[in-house]
Structure formats: C-alpha cells, structure tokens
Image (tube, rainbow, N blue to C red):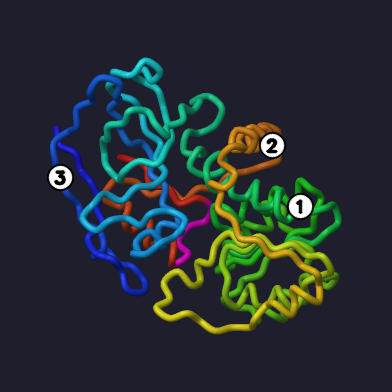
Amino acid sequence: MQNQTIVLASRPQGEPSADQFRFETGALPQPAAGQVLLKTRYVSVDPYMRGRMNAGKSYVAPFEVGQPISGGIVAEVVESQHDQLPVGSVVVGNLPWQEYSVSDGAGLTRIPTDKAPISYFLGLLGMPGLTAYFGLLDICQPKAGETVVVSGAAGAVGMVVGQLAKIQGARVIGTAGSDEKVAYLKKLGFDEAINYKTANIAEALAAAAPAGVDCYFDNVGGAITDAVYNNLNKNARIAICGQISMYNATEVPVGPRPEGKLLTTSSLMKGFIVSDYHSRWPEGVARLSEWLAEGKLHAEETITEGFDQIPAAFLGLFKGENTGKAIVKMA
C-alpha cells in the first residue's frame, strides 16, 4: 500500500494558489513499539493556516517548505502497539496532511463516537467551538440585553459565537458575505444579519445597533471593524480572534486608528489564541456538549470529499465558499 502526503511546495506572495501544494507518494508507514498507525478520516482547513505558510516568528511555528502541512485531523487507529489506543479508537489531534500517519499518542485525544458526529470535534466541539467559547465568555462576557456584533458570523467560529451570545440573553448582529449566509444566520437565531458585500456597512451597522455595541467578536478586521469602532458603548469589550480580510495582504493597510474610540468609551480590546486556554479545554468541551445535547447549539459543516481536494477546500476559505466549518472527508 502507498501513502499520499501534501507538502508545502513554496511560500505564497499574497493570496495562495494550488501551486503552493505538492502531492507526494511514499510507502505506508509502520508503527513501532508504543505507536499506532492512524487512518485519516476528516481533515480541518482553517484560516490561521495561511499565516503558517509565511516565514517568520508567530505564535506557532511556520510550515517548512518541502515538509508536510499539518492541522486538525480526526483519525482512526487501524494498527496499534500502544496500550491506551487500541484498534478502532477514534482520535483528534494536530497531524500531517497524510492518508496514513504514525503517532506515539502524544497530543492525541480519544473522542467518543456516540455523542455527536466525529467531524464535530474539528468544529463545534473542537478548536473553533472552543475559540468561540473562551473568546466570547471570558473576554467579551456578554450580559442579558447587551448588543453583540460578530464579524465572519457564518464561519466556523462566528456561528458558534452568535449562538452562545443568544444563550446568554444578548441581542446579536452578524456580518456575512452573501444573502444565503445572512438567511442562515437568521435561521440560527441572530437578531440582525448584514451582507457586508452589498450594504454600506457603516450605515447598516448603525441602523442594526441603535443602542450601540457592547461586545464585538472580531474574526475579520478591515472595514467592518472600523465601522464597529464608531458604535461602541461605554465599557465595550472587543475580542480579536482573526483578521482574515488582511491575511493575503502584501502591504500593511492603513485605516482608522482605534485608540481614541477605545479611550473615550473605556473599552477593552484583547487579542487571544485558543491555546492560551488549553488547560480549560475540557471545561469548554463539556459545556458545548451540554448545550448541543439540549438543542441550544447547532452545527453547520461544508464538507468536501477526497484527499486530493484538501488544497481546494483550504483556498475556498478566502473566497467565502464555506458556511460553518470547512472539512474534508476522506473518500
């Protein structure tokens, strides 16, 4: 049997393309004592991976040219020499983009197969859901009756943020890039949703939030975030989760400077990475699982099939092709 791997062929300048990915074929790896052979079942593609394609220091090491790309993967143990991971175990962890991989179990979490679809552990019950949980509840801390704005609201993180804010009793406004996504957000229970591609975002946001904005969960940056600054209430809280509007920029864009607005409204702005909360992940998974079981949370996935479609699914993130979590299912 042979094993396919996707490696980083070159570093992109601006928006990445299929040329940045190379498929390599090798022999099926064999587990040694204390190791398992994993068969990839689902692969997560996420916007943060774009930053790892660049050289330079960040909160996580960059991908190396000529080496496998890695990310969140749900895999099944198909051969085991590990006491705690018998054949048939399903695990989630940061693994290489390979059809099969070998692991000693470090960094892997065994997941139940009877509580939710296993793909949910890459979305609602995985990194995106935990990002929403800690960013909203720990940083923004919305209170009943407050107004929460979520940019990138139809994405894997944003859709969970909005639902969690509704559970807290807040009024929720989301921004998205199509009328179909706006309709989906309203179906999820968002009070207002704005298509930022067709609306004047500054006017639409002011109209949707006549009482101002108390919490802002920022997945996007750019013009949407600039518009939010003009509507902040006293003691507003802003969680900076992502800046996807600028990930492919080749020059640093110049926009409104927020310091004056933050000063005059006594607002808090805090950036965060979900790994900051790693010690509390079990708490987050437990709470999210509870709300899912109660029907208070709903998941949406955009699933692409086939190992060879992983690069296309990743590139689609920057064209807004996904609603909810973008995942690749192995054929």
Q: Calculate the distance from the C-alpha at mark 3 to the C-alpha at mark 1.
A: 48 Å
Q: Residues within 10 Å of mark 1 (few under 14, many from 20)?
A: some
Q: Nearer the viewer, residue 85 or 290?
A: 85
Residue 50: x and y, percent? 40, 62
Give SS at disc 2. Answer: helix
Give SS at disc 1. Answer: loop
Image position of 132 with respect to 174: above or below: above
Q: Earlier in the sequence, mark 3 or mark 2?
A: 3
Q: Which residues are magenta?
A: 319-324
The disc labelled 1 sits on which kind of residue?
A: Gln
Residue 99: name its quadrant. Answer: top left
Mark 3 sits on what residue? 25
Q: Residues within 10 Å of mark 3 (few under 14, many from 20)?
A: few
Magenta segment includes 323: yes
Residue 312: x and y, percent? 33, 58
Residue at 27%, 56% (x, y): give it: 64
Q: Earlier in the sequence, mark 3 or mark 1?
A: 3
Residue 242: name its quadrant. Answer: bottom right
Q: Residue furthest front?
A: 57
Mark 1 sits on what residue? 141
Q: Nearer the viewer, mark 3 or mark 1?
A: 1
Q: Calculate the distance from the C-alpha at mark 3 to the C-alpha at mark 2.
A: 43 Å
